[in-house]
């Protein structure tokens, strides 16, 4: 039992051992399995990680390549986005040496490159500048409309050209080019500006040709030549058909030929010569030396040149025959010299017709030179007759002889004859000068003698006779043939000044004498003569060309004195007239009509009286005015027909507002009876 139990226990122990062994085996196997699984998993993870790292590296490199290509093409915003994605991935993904290098390079580029910095701010590079995205979108929309307009204009230009409306075609091309030039950087890829400009220049050629033909038909050759030449230059520039170019050249030369002919007929010789020079330039520029076209065009040139020269010669003959002024001769010679120089410098100078014209020009120049010399001689002769001998001799030697030594006259027999005639004229001038010198000397001596006599008369006070002698001397000078000579002009000027001084002194002396005479007449109660003397003073001093202060002073004195006399005459004539009317009214009563005319007023100061005097007439406030005048003058210039009283501080009586003492004076006469105007003054009357 025990054995069984032992066996059972041993068996149980063995089973437990087996169980533990199995469990260990299971555990070991499990561990091994786990380790194996982990190993396998780790290996798989390592492989997957390596694959992911490789994919990341490929992605980074791909993004960089895309960014580089976009940057190279100018797509800066797209390039920046690729670079920004690289930087974003670098922050979330494990790094490796290969990717680190790329990320570092991109990061440096993004932070330092101005292009990428601007792109990072949302700016768009367009038209050579950085603009905000909104501005870019606006330009984009404007460009879209602009492109449509340009295409429409180009279609219209082509259609107008096909229909022969060259002006419209040019206008459309110009508008299209202006619109292209508005955004040249944006439209460069959409429109070939060079081709459009070439089409525009072709349209210009046809337009100028059309305008030239219209102007030519109207006879406007200058305008036609202008348009033909424009068309010709444009045709060669854009290399239009050779036949058209040749036709344009011929039409241009034809128009210039007609233009030169018109200018020559209008005496516009320099302009005509310029037109011919332009023909020569066109021939040389657009034809080959050996071509038939050049020979034909040279023939047109020679014909135009010949017409010009013939017109010039004809015009110059008319000028020479009419003997016009020196300036016209010089102009004619200048034109001929210019034309002759152009002919001789031209490669066509040996052409028979041109050489013949050159010889004619030389002869005409000699004729004009001779005519001008003759004109100079005549002018010098006139100067000599006027006494301008030095000027006459100067132009004969400096101008006339100089022309004899100028080509083509120089060295010819004709020049020798002209020099001999000039020498004779110089001899005439010299002899005339010597004779005039003697006559002028005698004239000056005669004038000096008259001046001496006039001076003596002046010193004696014979002013009038002195002035007459001065006038006589001046007349001799002015009527002589030497009057225009500077020396005689100076003598005349000095003599006129001397005469003027004498006249001034004479005027001053006369005015002084007249004033003295007026004063004496006042003192002697001669009012009319005093008034006449004052009027004479005012008449003599009315102008006063010398602005002399003495004359001004005497004029003022005479004016005051004349006013004084006029005032006295007016006041007291009326006062006496009034007193007379009163007297006769009392004498004859109211039934008698009283008519009193031409009342003369005369005041007489009592003899021996040294006292102040008063006028006792009924003339109101004017009495005081007269008393004031009397006080200032100290005398009574008039003889009175009324009672004159003397004012006295003692024994005074009141008479019409003036305190006076009675004094006897002469009475007046009116008609056959003596009368007295002082009705309240008693005094003895005298007839």
Image: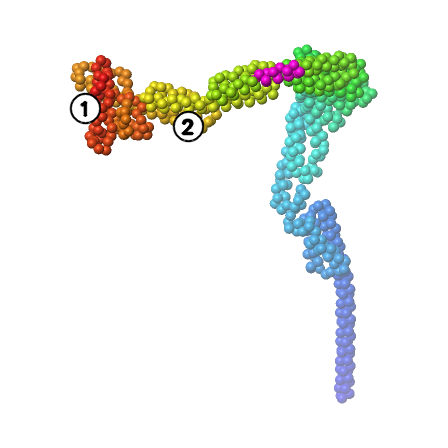
Rendered location of residue 16, percent (x, y) = 75, 80
Give the magenta-colored segment's residue range. 433-447
Residue at image coords 71%, 59%: 93
In this rendering, the answer to whether 32 lies above or below 401 is below
Q: Quadrant of residue 582?
A: top left
Query: Looking at the rendering, in which quadrant would you find the C terminus?
Result: top left
Left or right placement of residue 554 versus residue 302 in this view: left
| Residue indicated by mark 2 | 553
Main SS class of the magenta portion in the image: helix
State how far apart marks 2 and 1 are (Cα). 46 Å
| Front-most of residues 287 and 668 | 668
Residue 222 seen: yes
Residue 384 colored in magenta in the image:
no
| Front-most of residues 628 and 237 | 628
Left or right placement of residue 460 versus residue 366 in this view: left
Instruction: Give the SS element for disc 1.
Output: loop
In this rendering, the answer to whether 48 lies above or below 155 is below
Q: Quadrant of residue 92?
A: bottom right
In the picture, the disc for residue 682 is 1
Rendered location of residue 405, percent (x, y) = 75, 18
Rendered location of residue 623, percent (x, y) = 26, 27
Residue at image coords 75%, 82%: 12
Q: How would you rate the neighbour count of disc 1 (Cα within 10 Å): few for under 14, some for 14-19, many for 20 or more?
A: few
| Outermost bottom residue | 2
Q: How would you rate the neighbour count of disc 2 (Cα within 10 Å): few for under 14, some for 14-19, many for 20 or more?
A: few
Q: Nearer the viewer, mark 2 or mark 1?
A: 1
Residue at image coords 75%, 23%: 281
Q: Quadrant of residue 56?
A: bottom right
Rendered location of residue 334, percent (x, y) = 71, 19
Left or right placement of residue 528 versus residue 350 in this view: left
């Amino acid at each position: 039992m025990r054995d069984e139990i032992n066996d059972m226990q041993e068996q149980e122990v063995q089973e437990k051992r087996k169980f533990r062994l199995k469990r260990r085996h299971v555990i070991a196997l499990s561990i091994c399995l786990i380790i194996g699984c982990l190993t396998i998993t780790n290996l798989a993870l390592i492989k997957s990680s390596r694959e992911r790292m490789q994919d990341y590296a490929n992605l980074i490199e791909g993004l960089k390549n895309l960014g580089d290509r976009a940057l190279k093409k100018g797509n800066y915003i797209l390039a920046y986005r690729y670079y920004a994605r690289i930087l974003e991935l670098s922050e979330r993904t494990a790094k490796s040496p290969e990717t680190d290098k790329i990320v570092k390079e991109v990061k440096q580029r993004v932070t330092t490159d101005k292009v990428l910095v601007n792109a990072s701010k949302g700016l768009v590079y367009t038209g050579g500048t950085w603009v905000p995205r909104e501005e870019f979108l606006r330009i984009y929309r404007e460009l879209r409309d602009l492109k449509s307009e340009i295409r429409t204009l180009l279609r219209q230009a082509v259609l107008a050209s096909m229909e022969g409306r060259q002006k419209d075609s040019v206008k459309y091309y110009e508008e299209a080019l202006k619109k292209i030039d508005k955004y040249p950087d944006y439209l460069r890829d959409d429109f070939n500006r060079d081709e459009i400009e070439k089409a525009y220049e072709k349209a210009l050629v046809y337009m100028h040709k059309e305008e030239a033909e219209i102007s030519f038909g109207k006879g406007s050759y200058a305008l036609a030549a202008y348009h033909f030449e424009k068309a010709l230059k444009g045709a060669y520039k854009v290399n239009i058909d050779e036949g058209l170019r040749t036709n344009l050249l011929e039409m241009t030369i034809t128009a210039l030929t007609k233009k030169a002919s018109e200018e020559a007929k209008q005496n516009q010789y320099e302009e005509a010569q310029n037109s011919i020079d332009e023909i020569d330039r066109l021939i040389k520029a657009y034809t080959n030396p050996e071509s038939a076209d050049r020979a034909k065009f040279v023939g047109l040139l020679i014909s135009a040149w010949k017409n010009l020269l013939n017109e010039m010669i004809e015009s110059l003959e008319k000028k020479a025959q009419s003997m016009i002024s020196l300036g016209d001769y010089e102009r004619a010679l200048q034109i001929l010299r210019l034309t002759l120089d152009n002919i001789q410098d031209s490669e066509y100078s040996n052409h028979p017709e041109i050489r013949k014209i050159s010889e004619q020009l030389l002869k005409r120049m000699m004729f004009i030179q001779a005519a001008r010399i003759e004109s100079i001689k005549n002018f010098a002769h006139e100067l000599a007759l006027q006494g301008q001998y030095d000027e006459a001799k100067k132009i004969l030697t400096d101008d006339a002889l100089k022309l004899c030594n100028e080509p083509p006259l120089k060295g010819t027999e004709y020049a020798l004859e002209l020099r001999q005639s000039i020498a004779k004229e110089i001899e005439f001038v010299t002899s005339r000068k010597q004779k005039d010198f003697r006559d002028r000397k005698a004239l000056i001596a005669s004038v000096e003698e008259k001046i001496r006599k006039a001076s003596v008369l002046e010193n004696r006070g014979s002013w009038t006779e002195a002035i007459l002698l001065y006038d006589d001397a001046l007349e001799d000078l002015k009527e002589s043939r030497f009057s225009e000579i500077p020396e005689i002009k100076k003598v005349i000027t000095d003599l006129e000044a001397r005469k003027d001084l004498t006249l001034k002194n004479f005027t001053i002396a006369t005015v002084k004498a007249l004033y003295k005479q007026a004063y004496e007449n006042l003192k002697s109660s001669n009012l009319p003569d005093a008034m006449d003397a004052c009027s004479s003073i005012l008449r003599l001093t009315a102008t006063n060309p010398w602005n002399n202060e003495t004359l001004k002073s005497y004029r003022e004195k005479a004016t005051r004195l004349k006013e004084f006399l006029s005032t006295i005459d007016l006041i007291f004539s009326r006062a006496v007239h009034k007193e007379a009317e009163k007297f006769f009214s009392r004498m004859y009563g109211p039934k008698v009509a009283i008519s009193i005319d031409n009342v003369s007023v005369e005041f007489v100061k009592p003899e021996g009286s040294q006292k102040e005097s008063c006028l006792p007439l009924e003339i109101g406030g004017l009495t005081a005015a007269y008393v004031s005048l009397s006080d200032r003058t100290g005398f009574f210039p008039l003889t009175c027909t009324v009672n004159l009283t003397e004012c006295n501080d003692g024994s005074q009586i009141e008479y019409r507002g003036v305190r006076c003492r009675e004094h006897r004076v002469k009475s007046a006469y009116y008609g056959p009876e003596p009368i007295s105007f002082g009705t309240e003054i008693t005094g003895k009357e005298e007839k």
